[in-house]
Amino acid sequence: MCGPPLEKCDLASSNPTRPGGAMASPVSPKTTVSSSPTAVPTETNPPSPHTSHRSKISNIAIIGIIIGDVLVLGLVSLLLYCYFWRNYSSMLTSEKSSVQAEKIVYSYSSSPYPNPAQSGYERGKMVFFDGERRFELEDLLRASAEMLGKGGFGTAYKAVLDDGNVVAVKRLKDLNVPGKREFEQQMEVLGRLRHPNLIGLKAYYFARDEKLLVHEFMPNGNLFWLLHGNRGPGRTPLDWTTRLKIAAGAARGLAFIHSSGAPLRLVHGNIKSTNVLIDKLGNAKLSDYGLSVFASLPSASKSNGYRAPEAALDGRKLTSKSDVYSFGVLLLELLTGKCPSIIDNSGPGIGYSGVVDLPRWVQSVVREEWTAEVFDLELMRYKDIEEEMVGLLQIAMSCTQVAPDQRPKINYVVKMIEELRGVEVSPSHEALESVSESPSASEDTCRASE
């Protein structure tokens, strides 16, 4: 079918006479015809607007869910981190404080306070009597310490805490403490004692190797310093009015101790001038009371001039009567200005020198009717006090009787002292103004502090 007069069949794919040959289709090769008579040409349809909107909503929801999950996971992680960090921080702070305390004690190896860094150390705790915890042992470790003096039961220190408060700390030593329970029971008794003429016990610290007592601090020192310290030029003597007030105050404090410990028969056990502290108004305050129950027998029986004869022979015989004897020695010390144990060079032979107790020396002088030589020369400047001095001397001599039954009770002693003037004596501030803060006298001045 190709060739003239028809168009030339250039597009014939094959010879029609050959098997499998085919005539070229007059239809355009670009058009595909379906076998179905109703078929129409198919084209790619564009996406519907509704389908695109649904697709966008699904993507935003997925992104929102992912972001929400991340936020929740981050919040939970933050809470867990804060919780565990708080516990870790507390533990770290505790360990740091412990290490710091050990470093402080190690740096100040000569510190008067216990050393927790020592091997086998048993850590105790501070026990307060006023119900309010003000400081811990670490605060005492950081405080500046100044030694005030040494006594039979230990060494006293002045401690200035970080908050500015000043306390007196006594480090006990050579005590015969049966156990922690006995010590705590005695401290509970002493902690309840409150009187204007007693040093208030603020707290105590107990451990196997260390025992501390915390008291209020007295800036004017003790009676021993006022009587025997700075006996040189420029010294302001302790006037008679102040001495009489100190005697009356100390007697009242001792009477309160004897009346307060009725079930336990509480006694002071260590009356001496170093344990009579003076406040700013010249009032006497007794310290170191009630500790004699823990004293070891060798130190308890050691005579220091104040010890009653029966107590010097047997340290277990510390009673209210032995306290009265020691108080009598204290009165003689106030009157004479001499130490409880004095050196007597009047014995037989050249170069004789012996130590005589103050009561024996006073009795020998009075027996020779030289009563005026008994009194302190610093008291001779005051007028119209001879009768009062003689009256106080008689009270002191009655208190220092050798036989305990012949000594008066301390309540009667208080009454006799108060009757010397008929009214309560007032202190003289002039004598106390010359006393420096935290005074301490050398043991070479007088052996009363032993």
Image (cartoon, helix red, strand yellow):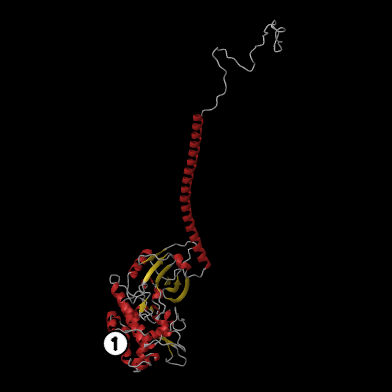
**Which image quarter: residue 310?**
bottom left
**Nearest the eye: 208 or 314:** 208
Quadrant into which the C terminus falls: bottom left
Residue 33 percent location from the top left of the image: 59, 14
**Up/down of 85 relative to 34, above or below:** below
Relative side of 61 to 393, left or right: right
**Which image quarter: residue 359?**
bottom left
Q: How many marks?
A: 1
Which residue appears farthest toward the front when viewing the image?
Answer: 5
| Number of other residues with Cα within 10 Å of mark 1, as a class: few under 14, some 14 to 19, many 20 or more | few
**Up/down of 3 relative to 185, above or below:** above
Which residue appears farthest toward the top when viewing the image?
Answer: 17
**Nearest the eye: 198 or 187:** 198
- Residue beneath label 1, please? 421
Give the amino acid type for the residue marked by disc 1 in the picture: Arg
Using the rendered image of the protein, determine whether residue 145 is visible from the camera's viewpoint. Answer: yes
Residue 163 percent location from the top left of the image: 44, 69
Using the rendered image of the protein, determine whether residue 117 is visible from the camera's viewpoint. Answer: no
Residue 93 percent location from the top left of the image: 48, 58
Residue 20 percent location from the top left of the image: 67, 8
Q: Residue at x 51, y 30 (%)?
A: 49
**Up/down of 212 relative to 15, above or below:** below
Q: Residue at x 47, y 74 (%)?
A: 146
